[in-house]
Amino acid sequence: MPRRTLSDKVWNRLCQSGAFRRIAEPFAPTIEPNRWIFIIGCYNSGTTLLKSILAEHEAITQLPARGGAYAEELEWPEAYGWTRMWHKCYDALRMEPGPGTDQIARSIRRKWELVLGGAPDNVLVKSITDAVRIPFLNAYFRPAYFIYIVRNGYAVAEGIRRKATPADWGCNRYADAYPIDLCAEQWKESDRVVEGDRPETDRFLTITYEELAEETETTLRVVTDFLGLPSLKQGEIDQVWNVHGVRSKIKNMNSKSFTNLSDREIRRIEEVAGGVLKKYGYRRPSRVEKNRNWGERL
């Protein structure tokens, strides 16, 4: 069933069908890329922006959607009623090397190879829940390169609350919205889990959203050097990006999130995640930072 007879969009949708995968998986090509590149980070941390930029690189082929869209073995928190809140079902999502897991990994690879087609040299994968699967990915997707992007916890917590729709996934306890402290807990737990698994990885790089937004060329050069790939070209960077429906050139959007936080909510975030905020040097948003977005609107 040659991929070239179908458009990429149609083929992508077919590969997201479990029925189609059961038929096609035995015929999936066997690929051994030079690099498996995994972007990890908390929700609303710039992972999609970074993926979009790196996907422009001529040597990188991206998996079109999250890994679990093509492999049912990779569960997602929404299946447990926790949208954008994987720390509430961590035990169900966690994957580590162990008896029989090599077979699970081979099945996932065949399904991913089915959608990728051809023989890509470098495969880029971005799934938020891969943060709970680092040991598994490091063991069975070799060589694995992990890029961890961290963003200001105040902005992340606000973004999770704003974008999450718990009621749509049967979470009636938080039908209207998650409380801000629960969102801060997700940010804190994301960092705890990733940093806990970091020593077991072979190749790991941490960058921040703020570095990516404010020192874009320098930060992307750090990323491509880490990957051992040529730098991105200027035209591949300096363009308007469409991230979750927002079209913009690369810029720091934190002040927009700060504006949506009350002083009480800021204190709640600090009570939950103060240690991690301090670790990364994220200070309480000043009144100037909170009001900056209003000035940009005028």
Image (cartoon, rainbow, N blue to C red):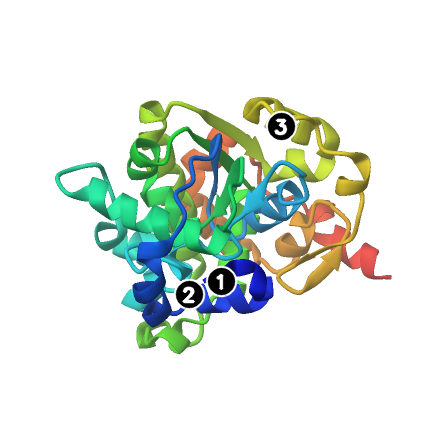
Question: Neighbour class for label 1 at 10 Å: few (<14), some, many (≥20)?
Answer: many
Question: Neighbour class for label 3 at 10 Å: few (<14), some, many (≥20)?
Answer: some
Amino acid on which the number 3 mark rests in the picture = Thr
Question: Which residue appears at 32% of the width and 66% of the height?
Answer: 23
Closest to the observer, 183 or 284 = 183
Closest to the observer, 114 or 291 = 114
Q: Say above or below: 58 vs 260.
A: above
Q: Position of residue 95 (x, y in %)?
A: 25, 44
Quadrant of the rendered structure where residue 170 is? bottom left
Q: Which residue is mark 2?
A: 178
Can residue 184 be seen here? The reply is no
Label number found at residue 99: none
Q: Position of residue 125 (x, y in %)?
A: 48, 45
Label number found at residue 224: 3
Label number found at residue 161: 1
Question: Alpha carbon of mark 3 to alpha carbon of mark 1: how far?
Answer: 33 Å
Question: Alpha carbon of mark 1 to alpha carbon of mark 2: how far?
Answer: 6 Å
Question: Which residue appears at 37% of the width and 69% of the height?
Answer: 20
Which secondary structure lies at badge 2? loop
Amino acid on which the number 2 mark rests in the picture = Tyr
Amino acid on which the number 1 mark rests in the picture = Arg
Q: Which is in the foreground here, disc 3 or disc 1?
A: 3
